[in-house]
Amino acid sequence: MSLELRKHFEELITLSDEEFATLTSYFKLRKLKKHQYLIQENEPITNIYFVTKGLLKASYIDTHGKEHIIQFAMENWWISDFQAFYTGVPSVTSIHCLEDVELYSLSKDDLEKICLENHKVEHFFRVKNSLGYVALQKRILSLLMTDAKERFEQFSAQYPTLIQRVPKTIIASYLGVSRETLSRITRK
């Protein structure tokens, strides 16, 4: 099983070889090609995903056909339509591969099982969910409180490798600005 997955868990918890083997028995490896969808809008969502290779974007298309990028996920990040995963409603986002992707899926039922079996794993997921909530709050506040230039500077500082991997049109959508506005900002 993935060395990346073990390293990721051991950033927060220590697992014996036996515990790690039990944990990873619940994960399933998936490989997708660039331009494939991991999740499409209105699907039931029963898995969360840990990315070991590649890059994805989660987006929402509004009633006017405009795409809004909710999040990116690259190596060592988790992704899903979390609202759908945790509440059972159909997905409102689509998750699309921007590069060839390798990831591990974990079902909601298996997540519940392993958290009941191993409190260290439960602690890991509680911390990860808390950090995800903090990141979401920071993103929302950035959209509300900063101008386009500041948002781009924050994005560049926080995710320097994404600037090279993601087309400017997609970065602009993530920042809530037009491609033209982003071009003006990056020329200065």
Image (cartoon, rainbow, N blue to C red):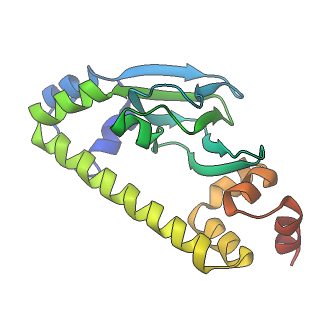
Task: Identify the residue at horizontal 71%, vertical 62% (top origin).
Answer: 176
Does 133 sit left or right of 11 as displayed? right
Say if residue 77 shows up in the picture. yes
Q: Nearer the viewer, residue 94 or 127?
A: 94
Work out whether residue 14 can be spotted. Answer: no
**Residue visible at 15% across and 30% down?**
19
Q: Is residue 23 left or right of residue 134?
A: left
Residue at the extreme front: 63
Q: Position of residue 107 (x, y in %)?
A: 33, 25
x then y, percent, for residue 70: 59, 51
Q: Relative to residue 165, is residue 104 depicted above or below?
A: above
Task: Give the quadrant of residue 113.
Answer: top left
Foreground residue among 87 and 148: 87
Q: Quadrant of the N terminus?
A: top left
Could you tell me which residue is drawn at 86 percent across and 79 percent down? 188
Residue 120 location, x and y as percent?
Answer: 14, 44
10 in relation to 39, above or below? below
Q: Is 43 situated left or right of 56 in this image?
A: left
Q: How many marks?
A: 0
The answer to which of 106 and 39 lies nearer the viewer is 39
In the rendered image, residue 89, in percent from the top left (x then y), is placed at 42, 34
Please report the residue visible at 47 percent of the width from the left and 37 percent of the height from the top: 80
Q: Quadrant of residue 131?
A: bottom left
